[in-house]
Amino acid sequence: MARPVVIPTIEKAENLPPGQGRDKSKVRMGFNFPERAFQTREIVYFLQQPETHSFRLYHDYTETEPGIKNYVNVVRAGSKASNPSALNLDTGQPLKVETLVGNAIKEKGIDIGSDFSLTAEAIVIWFDPVKQGSTTRIRIEETYTDPNRYLTVNNELIWDRAFGRVHNTLVLPDGWWLTANAIPATVFLNEDGLVSLYYVNDAPGDIDVFVKALKK
């Protein structure tokens, strides 16, 4: 007599990223995930002098989903965003940018999920809804101040901040030279002669980038 086929139990509608509490002995049904190989996000951080605790960044992003008309960037707790601006890279057109805090986020119909609180801050970029079969590529620029994760200790620059994008470049401020780097990166001098580190994050989660530098 043939042995009965045992069908393994399947976890239905579980949508947890790898390593975050799921039962790894079961298949995840209905698991929605970003395909890292197809992500078009690129971000470049320009560190200002460390006593300012500030860095300027630009972030390029291609929206492919028909009907989408905004991009939302939730400001991390402990950081402060200022001087946001945005550009449609396909047309060169400046885009409307709003900084929303707390209930103003919900009033605009923006859903930031579990990141919402009365003190939550979101930068929202508005553009024409993406048409079927087309895409929209935008560039967002902002200045962030983060005294807890970008500072100096005993005259040594320290950057300790997670990167969640696929393509990330960190540019040290003028006059500083790299002394330590915890995550593999391509290190080079950019066109302005500034020390730069390029990180590729092809994993589902963040990479904890830790960098030290000394003044020349």
Image (spheres, rainbow, N blue to C red):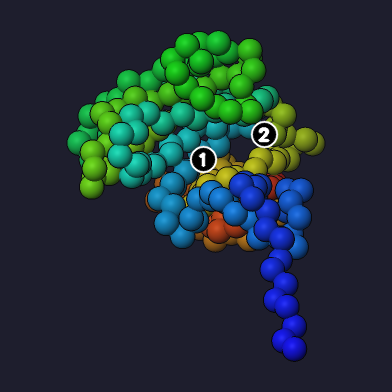
Query: Looking at this view, is 128 or 159 the one in front?
Result: 128
Q: Position of residue 127 (x, y in %)?
A: 30, 28
Indicate the quadrant where residue 93 lies: top left
Q: Residue shown at 41%/31% (left/top)?
A: 71
User: Is residue 141 positioned above or below 201 on the image?
Assistant: above
- Residue beneath label 2, please? 150
User: Is residue 170 positioned above or below 1 on the image?
Assistant: above
Instruction: Kindly report the distance in space between the C-alpha atoms of the residues bearing marks 2 and 1.
Output: 12 Å
Helix, strand, or loop for circle 1? strand
Q: Residue shown at 23%/47% (left/top)?
A: 133
Q: Position of residue 47 (x, y in %)?
A: 55, 37
Kindly identify the amino acid type of the residue bearing the numbered disc 2: Tyr
Q: Position of residue 52 (x, y in %)?
A: 61, 25
Query: Relative to residue 19, is residue 187 drawn left or right?
Result: left
Query: Looking at this view, is 136 or 47 the one in front?
Result: 136
Q: Position of residue 155 (x, y in %)?
A: 74, 37
> Split into 4 quadrants, where in the image is the N terminus?
bottom right
Q: Residue shown at 73%/78% (left/top)?
A: 4
Q: Is residue 52 visible?
A: no
Q: Residue shown at 56%/19% (left/top)?
A: 121
Badge 2: residue crowd in 10 Å (few <14, some 14–19, many ≥20): many
User: Is residue 70 positioned above or below 32 on the image?
Assistant: above
Kindly identify the amino acid type of the residue bearing the numbered disc 1: Tyr
Query: Relative to residue 184, is residue 99 drawn left or right?
Result: left
Query: Relative to residue 16, is residue 198 drawn left or right?
Result: left
Helix, strand, or loop for circle 2? strand
- Residue beneath label 1, please? 45
Query: Looking at this view, is 201 or 215 the one in front?
Result: 201
Badge 1: residue crowd in 10 Å (few <14, some 14–19, many ≥20): many
**Residue closest to the far right:** 154
Q: Is residue 105 visible?
A: yes
